[in-house]
Image (spheres, rainbow, N blue to C red):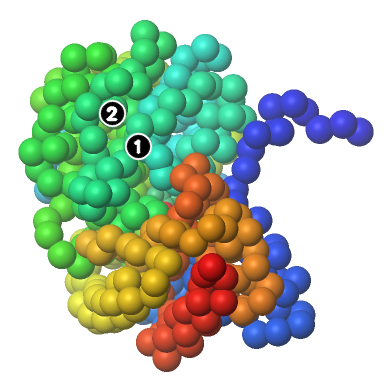
Amino acid sequence: MQAADRTKNVKYAIRDIAVLAKQVAKKKKVISLNIGDPNRFDFRTPPHLVNAVTKAMKQNKNFYADSMGEEEAIDAIADYHRKAGINVLNSDILVTMGVSEAIGLCIGAFFNRGDNVLIPRPSYPVYSAYLNLYEVGQKFYTLNEEANWNLDLKDIEKNITEKTKAIVVINPNNPTGAVYDKQTLKDLVNLAGQHDLLIFADEIYDELILEGKMYHIAALSKEVPVVTFNGLAKNFMAPGWRVGWAAIKDLGKMKEAKDALFQLARARLCAVTPQQYAVKPALEGNRKHLVEAKKKLRNRRDIVYKRINEIEGLSMKKPSAAFYAFPKIHIKMDDKEFATRLLEEEGVAVVHGSGFDMPEHFRIVYLAQEQLLNEALDKIESFVKRNRS
Ligand code: PLP
């Protein structure tokens, strides 16, 4: 049987590299700097969350959840956003199977063929994947590497067309690790208002700030509707639980779209149930795990930043949040070849920049312990040295 045409452009380079890494691992040791999964390294889900999920299972909360999410989780999510200055009602929250599902459902519910959505370049590939699947157009705005990967409002404006319905802002950013300042975000909200754009604010790394301050876009917006995405995967080190959500600040402008979203949500039944019982203890509980996690991440970020910039043929900007760096390749080698050969010849897995729609770069995940990270950086260094001509 043939594949449907709409699947042809659905790509997710991060997982594609993982497939190759698995093959290479049969022959040699592979150091994985390719997947942003803290639990594959020395980060653990806080025990009080594991206890909450275990308790829910033991109490037989193994039934189908409400399609919008369990009441306890929704209450906690709405409260968390209200405390951050984002005015949402409980009925504005949808609990999903990770942020990925929330993104897919919102794209499916809000946009038609012929519409387009502005996404950043470098981009996080789930947006492209779902836009392609639903045959919605995509336009890129380019993040400004020279300005530490900041938003470039002029470039954003240049790429808005009559068909542009929304803009995606990932803050803190994957793959660059940038955090945007308040004024830039306010200017972005104004621009969105002028062009009647909905904002998708992907804030899944909002508690993993290593330097600077995080501002929630929805809290800065008085007139522009904002859908904020967040979840337990990163801040609470539980990516395999698949718990995320969308919080819709609709300002009375999105009733029809929201109804469509909730209809799609009902059609997929519900998100996982027992794991939703970790949401309240997560959002209302202590953040002890983050103190240790951020200390480790700062050290590892500093190692990567120093060592990559010492390698002739590579350069990178300093990430301020999350656990990603996005170095530039200055040697004469295509980024896909760079990632493939680095994996095959040195056993180091990174993701090529074109997987994020930005060639001449690659993404490093700096979650690995220092010794392993240094080992990987030694290998990257000798690979670049060998191929510098
Ligand atoms: N959004 C961004 C920016 C991400 O980096 C990721 C995962 O890496 C996701 C969404 C997906 O999150 P989830 O695991 O909750 O589906």
Residue topped by disc 1: 142
84 vs 271, nearest the viewer? 84
Quick one: quadrant of the N terminus? top right
Residue 63 in the image: above or below residue 382: above
User: In the image, what residue occupies the spot 59% across and 48% down?
Assistant: 12
Residue furthest toward the bottom?
A: 371
Q: Amino acid at mark 1?
A: Thr
Left/right of residue 236 with respect to residue 372 in the rendered view: left
SS at mark 1? strand
Residue topped by disc 2: 155
Residue furthest toward the left?
A: 183
Q: Position of residue 320 (x, y in %)?
A: 22, 62
Lower sequence index among marks 1 and 2:
1
Residue 381 in the image: above or below residue 166: below
User: In the image, what residue occupies the spot 62% across and 79% down?
Assistant: 346
Q: Mark 1 and mark 2: span between their CA atoms?
A: 7 Å
- Name which quarter of the figure residue 219 lies in: top left
371 vs 236, nearest the viewer? 371
